[in-house]
Image: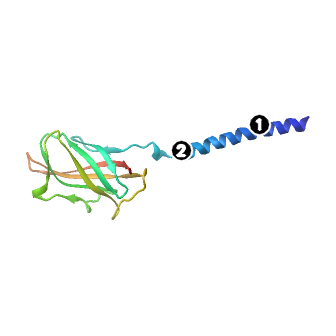
Amino acid sequence: MKAQSAIEYLTTYGWAIMIMAVVLSALYFLGLFNPGTFAGQECLLPAGFSCTNIYLFPNGLLNINLMQVTQSPINITGIGCSSNQSLIHMQTYSVSNQIYMPIGSNYTFSVFCYTSNSIYTGKLGSLYNGYLIINYTSTTTGFPHMITGQLIARVS
């Protein structure tokens, strides 16, 4: 009688442990334990600027829609995307082709994101964590400015 009770006890707990293992492995394969699954895209810029429609391609090309609501119209003179705030790979615009942005306007930029000295490449779903660097000149004062914002983009 004691042996039968012990076998029933082990069988019951064995099934419970096996069911829990199956459930946990299913949750693992669905990505529940990966924090990157829940991380959203984010672009944090100083006051007067915001970004929408962030789209990062697997080859490192970033399409980003930048909106400016500063106190005066501006000319964008350069923009870059880097993992270490480096200005080396910035896409600059000459005086003749600067991007003019009136107050309240937006513009979509395409720029490559870099990690160290190479263009970022990532597989679908991976996260890029870096900085968006923007150089601009106020058309009212003529003073140049540089702003840096935090960028988290998912490769899609």
Query: Could you tell me the amino acid type at mark 2?
Result: Leu
Q: Nearer the viewer, residue 143 or 135?
A: 135
User: Quick one: SS at disc 2?
Assistant: loop
What is the quadrant of residue 8 in the picture? top right
Q: Whole-percent x and y of residue 138? A: 12, 47
Looking at the image, which residue is at 43% across and 55% down? Answer: 123
Query: Could you tell me the amino acid type at mark 1?
Result: Thr
Looking at the image, which residue is at 50% across and 46% down? Answer: 34
Looking at the image, which residue is at 36% across and 48% down? Answer: 152
Pointers 2 and 1 in contact (C-beta within 8 Å): no
The 10 Å Cα crowd at callout 2, few under 14, some 14 to 19, many 20 or more, is: few
The 10 Å Cα crowd at callout 1, few under 14, some 14 to 19, many 20 or more, is: few
Residue indicated by mark 2: 30
| Horizontal arrangement in the rendering, residue 18 relative to residue 150 (left or right) | right
Label 2 vs 1, first from the N-terminus: 1
Q: Whole-percent x and y of residue 100? A: 13, 48
Separation of residues labelled 2 and 1 (CA atoms): 27 Å
| Horizontal arrangement in the rendering, residue 15 relative to residue 60 (left or right) | right
Looking at the image, which residue is at 23% across and 40% down? Answer: 47
The mark found on residue 12 in the picture is 1
User: Quick one: SS at disc 1?
Assistant: helix
Residue furthest to the bottom:
117
